[in-house]
Structures are given as structure tokens and as C-alpha cells.
Image (tube, grey):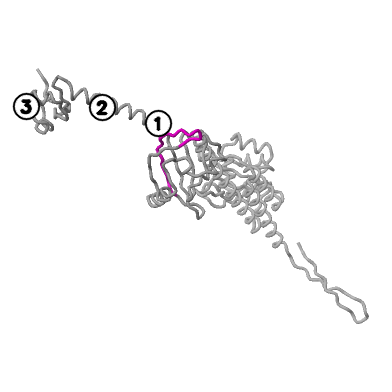
Amino acid sequence: MVRFPRHPADREDGSTRALVFSSDITGRKQTENLLRMQSEILERIAVGARLEEVLGRACALAEQQLPGATCAVLVRGADGETLDVLAAPGLERVLREALETRGVAGLAETLGAAAGPGERVIVDDTASDPRWDGLRGAAARFGIGACWSAPVLSERGPVGAFVVILPRPRRPGEHGGRVLDTAAHLAGIAIQRARDDERLRLTQFSIDRSSVSAFWLDPSGRFIYVNEEACRALGWHRDELLSMRLTDIDPELTAERFSAQWQAVKIEKRVEVETRHRARDGRTFPVELSANYFEFGGREYVCAFARDIRKRKQVEETLRESEDRFSRAFRSSPLAMLIARVEDGRLVDVNDEFLRGGGWSREEALGHTTEELGLWGDPRTPSG
């Protein structure tokens, strides 16, 4: 592109002439197009557009700057070796089908060769490049005269390649290389953002549907997040709980105690306690609370998980009552009774009748073996 500024100059005879200077502004226009491309793609990523839409638009914008080119984004498949087509709005149907069905072995991996080494792979003529030795027939059939690829990078390294396919042999040149690298970089940002969002949604989904009550607290004790189980266990709607504090559901917790506990969690990073929670209908139930301190975005939070331990407490109470009944029966039995370890016959408990019959004190009996007390032999020695 050439710009022609005009500078009028008066002649002696009174007529006017113009002095014309031309300057090539192609480079400037190419840079402007690249900047527009970056701006549009980043804006689409920021507003949460679908990944396929973002990558498809990146391909289209790159094609506009590379006349005659067809662009595609290929990403690693589940096996980590093969490449799948993620976006290629301008790709010929027969070529896309060949890539998606793997009708031509190794074609996708050769087109997206940059996904392997993590650096540009430029093939300016498929008819002579040795990397296409086994695929020259496919190149001729699908009209692939040249192929450029640049790695699409995530935080863990190459995840695929941005591919530029041309019908005739051609080198990218400076501008073509910039388009290729820019498109690959934007594709990497889009894919990383999509994967981060997917992990975040999975985390949110799993916590929301956890069988354990979960809630996040700020330093004032106010709930800033509660999951579905917390709402169910406490009988409050989510929006109601988000207007409350931990002291509203813990009858044993005062503002002063919460402040002290917050400092303890802040220092220890993780604290576990047993307490009681009060539901909307006034009933209380025991919970085991695991609190974890963290900072995010310059703010302090505690992530807490509360497990309802009513069943465990019932089991513990039943066991305690059973132990009490056994202890009373053991102590008051009219028969001499003892409890000894199987492995060595060492006494761990005896009742009063045993002590009376043997004439021992409790201190004399406990800790000794049945063999030492002359009751019977070493239990480890076979009988007979």
C-alpha cells in the first residue's frame, strides 16, 4: 500500500503544480491488522466465548492476512501422540474428513509437526521436502503445496499446533511468520483459558455436590460460599446463609472465640475441631470441622468442611455403654476371671474374685504372665 501526500507549489506563470511523495505503508497496515486480530481474539476469550468459536475466528483472521491460505488448529488426542482437528472453518471437506477419520496415516501429525519439538516447522514445498516423503500422494490429492506450523503452548508445554496450508510452494516471509506465531500464541491462550475454566467448573461441581458441608468464610466470619449439603443440613436457603455468619449456626461460638480461632487457623494453616451446629428448626447436631486458611487476591479466607458425626457419636456411645456393662459384669462376677494377651499370656486385667482366690494384689498380678503366676504354661508352647 502506497500513500501519496500532495504539496502544492506555485509556478511563475501563476499556475499551481503538486509535488507528490510516495511511501510504502504495507508494513504498518500489516502490523495494524495483527493488532486488531489480537484485540478481537483476546476480547472473545475475556467474555467467555466458546473455544471452538474463538479458534475458528483466529483461523479466519489469519486467512485474511495470508491470501490463499487455509488455517487449522490441531491438538493432541487422548493418547498424547496423535493430533485432532479442533478448529478449521476454511478446510476443504475431503481433507477434514481425512484428518478426522485418520484416513491417511500420519497426515495430521505431519501437518502439525510443530506440536512435537515445540518450535516452528516450515515446509515451503511438500513436493521436495523429505519430511513429506511418504505423503506426497496425499499432498497432491488434497492440494497441499506448502505447510507451516507453530506450536500451540499451554502452561505444561506444547498441546498442539496452528497450521497454515497453502496450495502452492511458498515461504512465510517476515509477515507470514508473524501471523503464524501470533495465531499460535492466541490459540494457546484460548485453550489454556478453556482448560482452566473446565477445571474450575469441575471443582465447583464436585464441591457443590459433596456429601460434606462446605463453606468459605471471610475474617468477619461471614459466609461467602456454601454448598448444597450445607444448605440441606442446616435447612437454610443459599441466599439466606450468605447473609449470615458462622456464629449464627454454632451455638458454642462467640465473636471473641471466633476471632481467636481465626488467628489459630491463620498460624497453623489447618485446624480440626468438634463442635455443634444449629439448624433452622433449632435442633443441634455434632460436627467435625476441618478449617483451612488461605489467601487469594490479597484477601484472607477460611475454607471449612463440616462432617455430620451423629452416627459416629451414636456408635461411640453404644460402644461405651457396652464396655460399661462388660466391666460391671467382669468386676462383680462370682467366678475368677482374667484377661490376658494371646501372644504371651501377660495379664492385662483381673477381677476381684481372681485376686481373692490367688491371694494376689492387683499390682502383683497385672503385668505378669500366666506361666509366671503358675496358672498354666506358655501359650506359645504347643500342648500335647
Quarter of the image holding residue 360? top left
Quarter of the image holding residue 6? bottom right
**Disc 3 residue type?**
Gly
**18 lies above or below 303:** below
**Nearer-the-camera pick, 253 or 107:** 253
Per the image, the residue denoted by label 2 is 324
Per the image, the residue denoted by label 3 is 359
Q: Mark 3 or mark 1, which is nearer the start of the sequence?
A: 1
Q: Which residue is rendered at x = 54% and y = 52% of the image?
A: 119
Q: Residue furthest bottom?
A: 12
**Nearer-the-camera pick, 343 or 312:** 312
- Region rendered in magenta: 278-293
Per the image, the residue denoted by label 1 is 310
Q: Quadrant of the N terminus?
A: bottom right
**Disc 1 residue type?**
Arg
Most common SS among magenta residues: strand
Q: Secondary structure at mark 1?
A: helix
Q: Position of residue 14 (x, y in %)?
A: 93, 79
Q: Are marks 1 and 3 in contact (CB under 8 Å)?
A: no
Q: Position of residue 282 (x, y in %)?
A: 48, 34
Q: Secondary structure at mark 2?
A: helix
Q: Quadrant of the C terminus?
A: top left
**Disc 2 residue type?**
Asp
Q: Mark 2 or mark 3, which is nearer the start of the sequence?
A: 2
